[in-house]
Amino acid sequence: MILIIGFYLLELIVLIGLILLGVFIYDKRKRANEGKEVPPGFLETKEVNIDPVTKVKSRVYYNEATGERFYKEMK
């Protein structure tokens, strides 16, 4: 009986750990290309994104050399 409870407890701990790891990785990836200052080499595009939840507008900048995109909040 104790072995069965221990097994399910271990599964629960691993599941919680994976969920927390996923949240931290997802959040880091989402916010990696956002900021207040546009890095050198990025060109302004005509594209504007609007977050449907917060209604915050972001201008998209593009680096032709690397293909990266950068999102700057608009006021």
Image: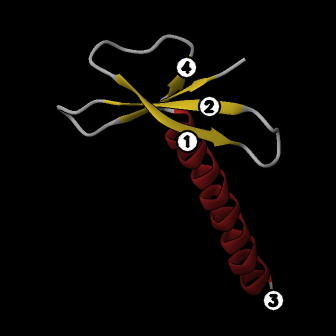
Disc assigned to residue 30: 1
> Where is mark 3, residue-wise?
1
**Mark sitting earlier along the chain (4/1):** 1
Q: Nearer the viewer, residue 13 or 41?
A: 41
**Mark sitting earlier along the chain (4/3):** 3
SS state under label 4? strand
Amino acid residing under circle 2: Ser
Pinpoint residue 66: horizontal percent, then vertical percent.
21, 35
* For residue 40, side relative to residue 10 (left or right): left
* For residue 27, side relative to residue 32 (left or right): right
How many residues crowd around disc 1 within 10 Å: few (fewer than 14), some, or many (20 or more)?
few
> Where is mark 4, residue-wise?
35
How many residues crowd around disc 3 within 10 Å: few (fewer than 14), some, or many (20 or more)?
few
Residue 2's image quarter? Answer: bottom right
Pinpoint residue 55: horizontal percent, then vertical percent.
80, 38
Amino acid residing under circle 3: Met
Closer to the camera: disc 1 or disc 3? Answer: 1
Amino acid residing under circle 1: Lys
Distance of label 2 from label 4 (alpha carbons): 10 Å
Distance of label 4 from label 3 (alpha carbons): 53 Å
Decide: is 11 above or below 29.
below
> Where is mark 2, residue-wise?
58
Closer to the camera: disc 1 or disc 2? Answer: 2
Distance of label 4 from label 1 (alpha carbons): 12 Å
